[in-house]
Image (tube, coloured by chain):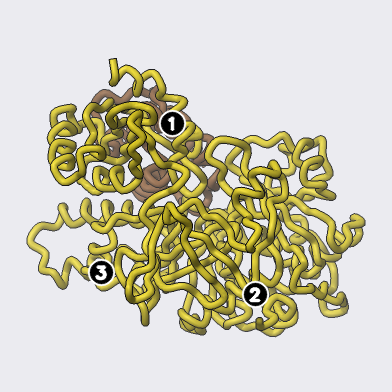
Chain colours: A yellow, B brown
Amino acid sequence: MKDQLNSLIAKMKSSTNSIESYTDGKKLIRSFSDVYKDVCKLHDILSNLGVQPRDHVGIIGSNSYEWVVADFTCIAMGLISVPLDPTVNHDMKENFEEFSLKILISEYPEDYPNVNVLDIRAFHDSELDCSTYQFTPYKYNPDDELTFKFTSGSTQRPKSILAKKKSVDAALTYVQDIFHHNKDDKIMVFLPMQTYQQRYWPYSAIIFDHDVIVIPKSYVFNSIKVDRPTVIMGVPYFYEHLHKIYLEEESNQPDLSSTQKRALFHNLLGGNIRYLWTGSAPIGMETLKFYQDMDIPLFQGYGMNEVCIVSKNNFEHNKVGSAGKLLPGKIIKFDEDNQILIKSEYEVNTTYNNALPEDNEKTFLKDGYVATGDLGYIDDEGYLFINGRSKELIIFSNAQKCHPIPIEKTVENTTKIKHCVVYGNDKSYLVALIIPTSPEVTENEVNDILQSVNEKLLPKERIYKFHIERSSFSQENGLLTSSNKIKRAKIYDVFKDKFEALYS
Amino acid sequence: MTEIENQIFDFITHIINKDDIKPEMLLKEDLGQDSIRMVTIITKMSAKFKVNIFEFSDRDLARLKTVNDLVELFKNKING
């Protein structure tokens, strides 16, 4: 495997490619050779504070140039970064104990007066002469750990896994091999930097000579138009929402030709898109087909924190609806329930950092495979398809089983339903909680949709009764994971009375 | 409500497209505005009131709970 990360800091020093961001409302464009100077300053500050290689350092803040400098400095110094979600409240003292933090680098240092905290902007005030400052970047071994990745547990506190350097080298190398990012590319990062795959793009920019723009989520629709990226990484819901924004704009301009419609959508995306990247959650066929019709490649893939990227559609091999072909270094097999098991030549790790022994045993199997919890199959041409979650199997009182996700996706692929969650463990039939796309959708409309969907389903898969919920699921109310997947167990718990009432 | 507060409130009502919105209503729980929809609202409001969206942080959004919070956020940005 090519050693990518050990060359990162040296390449940064001479890179003419740029990172773009916004600071205090103003656009900031900086070449990586200038970023190197800021890394030197933060390196100097942290060294003076007694921070040593292999120390654990927390980082918390919105996506920003400063976040990227903090991350690069961690790599340069051999620190293990612990990225924390800035949108939730933290007991930081507890985090210091749990993750053995030496220091916290924070956008909001005033929020954490009782811990050892450094303002993420501190390097801006440094007067260090970078031309004379010298340090030797930390030299990583393949099995050295770089950062904590947090996995979204469905019910309990998130589990974490420490990512090994070799898994990052492999992901960077194989992704570059299929997408050939180059000096004409500008990759937009707006999903939170605390998810590790977002941080791959600044690394990739330096190693493979392209530009990158890093922004908080709140800027995304404006920034796409103004900053004109060539590649965007987003979750399916983001692309579904862009589709809706387009439909709204199209409805204000009747009688557009198909060429004009295409131009309208391309302009909405800044007019410079080479391809769009998605994964993390299932995406509806309707959305995929819309992007295909608009000549905007939207490539779905599959991966998870425990195994990193597994498969990806791309320009050469793309089958709409699939999660693409396997990347090199990934071996796949299926258990008796069709659960996907993945073995990696360059594994992320072989254990969670903070999980119960039984959680580790269930996921990290003795033969080196990782049990993903996802169900799927490989078709005749080698494309991976995901069609459910094994952990979410519904077992009826008569021992018959059904997978809820395909049923829910069929309902959600209709126009007026945002979320559908079916329920039926130990019961004789399925019921559902339905969240319509807008408050105007009536009970009769929902009823008609479900009747129509039921006609296409097997009897055991049919939804016999439903409850319409007018509140929504969100990460904030704890009913969606950080990748916008539903937290089924939590939803069952919160709405237990509503579900049970449908059986009375 | 002041005149500017009324203007902001009316525009929010227009975007969310619902007549019976009240200032104390919760954006997510009562009006179904999840985080991506909130980004859309902020984008439209920034264009309407000529506020520089690049001055907002994700934390500004995360702290918005009610319609009134949104009115206050924009009123403060407009007033500088």
A113, A380: nearer the viewer: A380
Q: CA distance from mark 1 to mark 3?
A: 34 Å
Q: Residues within 10 Å of mark 2 (few under 14, many from 20)?
A: some
- Element assignment for label 1: helix
Check the image and report above or below for A298 versus A50.
Answer: below
Q: Is residue A38 left or right of residue A454?
A: right
**Residue type, numbered disc 2:** Asp
- Residue shown at 60%/52% (left/top)? A363
Q: Position of residue B73 (x, y in %)?
A: 48, 36
The residue that disc 3 covers is A292
**Residue type, numbered disc 1:** Ile
Q: Tell me the chain of label 1.
A: A
Q: Tell me the chain of label 3.
A: A
Q: Are marks 1 and 3 in contact (CB under 8 Å)?
A: no
A389, A127: nearer the viewer: A389
- Element assignment for label 2: helix
Q: Is residue A247 left or right of residue A68?
A: left
Q: CA distance from mark 1 to mark 2?
A: 38 Å
The residue that disc 2 covers is A169
On whether disc 1 and disc 2 are found on a single subunit, the reply is yes
Q: Are marks 2 and 3 in contact (CB under 8 Å)?
A: no
Q: Tell me the chain of label 2.
A: A
Which quadrant: the C terminus of chain A? top left
Q: Earlier in the sequence, mark 2 or mark 3?
A: 2
The residue that disc 1 covers is A491
